[in-house]
């Protein structure tokens, strides 16, 4: 499985640790983020990862900025993206099981590296349950279609 990762200046160190963590788990990681701590604009990286996910260049995406909020908002503007911000593992797991999220986001200024790893593992190991949840995703997609 190939995972795209994106980040802004506030999350360079965390991104580097997450890349190593994912590689140690056997995932291929594509870096779409910045490697500089100079101030930059998170929407650029949110969009890069989102476009890579919807084009199937990568299977899933992980985004990190200060809070995870801004970068996920940018990603969610790309049609077909279901990005979720998580600060704990339970929501990460349920977001995949119920919402089939394809991008996980969190904040480098909000959580520590060990919690980030737990969140990622829960998210990656969860499987979409389908059924009534697919109907709800279809409803979300319909909203997206009406807005385009």
Image: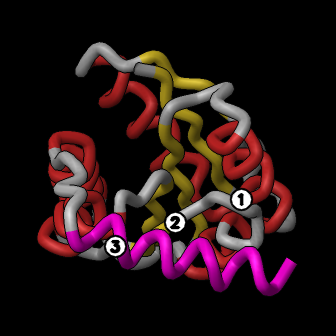
Q: Is residue 34 visible?
A: no
Which is closer to the viewer, label 1 or label 2? 2
Relative depth, front residue between 107 and 91: 91
Residue 95 in the image: state x and y as whole percent: 29, 68
Query: Residue at (45%, 31%) from the top-left corner?
Result: 19
Tell me which corner region of the image, top left, top right, bottom left or bottom right, holds residue 58.
top right
Q: Which residue is mark 1?
A: 46
Rendered-image quadrant of the C terminus: bottom right
How many numbered dots are placed on residues in this image? Answer: 3
- Numbered disc 1: secondary structure: helix
Up-down: is 126 above or below 146? above
Residue 18 as seen in the image, left or right of residue 50: left
Relative to residue 44, is residue 94 drawn left or right?
left
Residue 86 bears which disc, if any? 3
Residue interval drawn in magenta: 132-148
| Residue to which mark 2 is pinned | 83
Q: Is residue 93 magenta?
A: no
- The answer to whether the residues at label 3 and label 1 have Cβ atoms under 8 Å apart is no
Q: Is residue 133 left or right of residue 23?
A: left
The residue lying at 18 percent from left, 61 percent from top is: 93
Residue 87 falls in which quadrant of the image? Answer: bottom left
Whether tag 1 and tag 2 are in contact, CB under 8 A, the answer is yes
Which label lies toward us, 3 or 2? 2
């Amino acid at each position: 499985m190939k995972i795209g990762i994106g980040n802004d200046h506030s999350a360079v160190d965390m991104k580097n640790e997450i890349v190593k963590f994912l590689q140690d788990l056997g995932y291929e990681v594509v870096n779409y983020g910045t490697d500089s701590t100079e101030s930059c604009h998170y929407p650029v990286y949110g969009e890069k990862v989102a476009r890579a996910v919807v084009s199937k260049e990568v299977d899933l995406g992980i985004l990190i900025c200060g809070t995870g909020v801004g970068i996920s908002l940018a990603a969610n503007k790309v049609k077909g993206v279901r990005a979720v911000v998580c600060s704990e593992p339970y929501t990460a797991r349920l977001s995949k099981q119920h919402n089939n999220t394809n991008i996980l986001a969190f904040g480098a200024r909000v959580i520590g590296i060990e919690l980030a790893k737990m969140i990622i593992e829960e998210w990656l190991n969860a499987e979409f349950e389908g059924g009534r949840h697919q109907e709800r995703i279809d409803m979300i997609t319909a909203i997206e279609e009406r807005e385009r």
